[in-house]
Image (cartoon, rainbow, N blue to C red):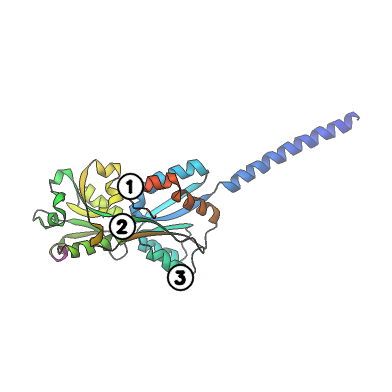
Amino acid sequence: MNRGECNMLKLFGTACVVVSTMLIGLAGSSWAGEITIAAASDLNFAFKDLVGEFEKSSGHHVKLSLGSSGNFYSQIQNGAPFDLYFSADIGYPKKLEEAGLTLPGSLYRYAVGRIVIWTGYETHINVAKGFDALREPGIKKIAIANPKHAPYGRAAVAAMEHFKVYEQVKDRLVLGENISQAAQFIESGACDIGIIALSLALAPTMKSKGMYWEVPADTHPALEQGAVILKSSQHQQSAREFLEFLKGEKGQEIMRRYGFTLPG
């Protein structure tokens, strides 16, 4: 082999290394992607933990949007570009499925939520009295989520009606856009007491500032929570991976930690 042929082989080998490196880079970028999740605000703290663990294990990036289930339902009907939708009311994902807007077979009942009466330590309100605590004359404002589009708000109203306090306190209700905003109203002192998601009451920031009384589950419609992958998603495989992570051991442990009852 002459010197010219040797140089040609060296150049060819170098080119192969460069091309291989480029292909490896492209392969890596095809596996790691970004998914956009619309999630009910009762998932605020649970999903921040869940997303962090998922990103570490998968290499994918998650863009998390938190809000009321009803508002997200309307946005998705109007073409909002979400990949996954986690609702606090499984009825909304079922309606999207019926409308042909979801990936067939992706509907999943991921949890059952619970509600609690919560107040800050500084109010000196005895929440152990349950709904009788709402009748105390010193209470001026009671926070709940807006029942028009927030499932936790509807559950709060149903429980108040069950305990026959709704008519007495309805003029003192302050409606949050979603359950997280209702919790913020009480935590900040803007409201004296409120009915919020157990998952928020168990979050470190609220757990250290107040106390809660768990509302019996049989006093309001079950908060069955459901998720779907949207048919319009451009990242369906990554969305499937997130859903499978939620169903796995680590995902289930995080959901239990925040007070969710799990399917099965």
Q: Is label 2 in contact with label 3 (beta carbons under 8 Å)?
A: no
Mark 2 surroundings: few (<14), some (14-19) or many (≥20) residues within 10 A: many
Give amino acid for label 2: Asn
Looking at this rendering, what residue extends furthest in the right direction? Answer: 2
Residue that numbered label 3 is attached to:
98
How far is mark 1 from mark 2, CA to CA? 18 Å
Secondary structure, mark 2, is loop
Query: In the picture shown, does residue 44 fall above or below 159?
Result: above
**Residue 125 in the image, given as x and y percentages of width and height:** 13, 48
Q: Verify CB contact (< 8 Å) between mark 1 and mark 2.
A: no
Q: Nearer the viewer, residue 120 or 189?
A: 120
The kind of residue tagged 3 is Glu
In the rendered image, the vertical position of residue 204 relative to residue 43, given as above or below: above
Residue 74: horizontal and vertical position, in percent? 40, 66
Q: Quadrant of residue 73?
A: bottom left
Q: Report if residue 231 lies within the magenta region.
A: no
Q: Which residues are magenta?
A: 163-167
Quadrant where the N terminus is found in the figure: top right
- Badge 3: how crowded within 10 Å, few (<14), some, or many (20+)? few
Image position of 125 with respect to 93: above or below: above
Q: Secondary structure at mark 1?
A: loop
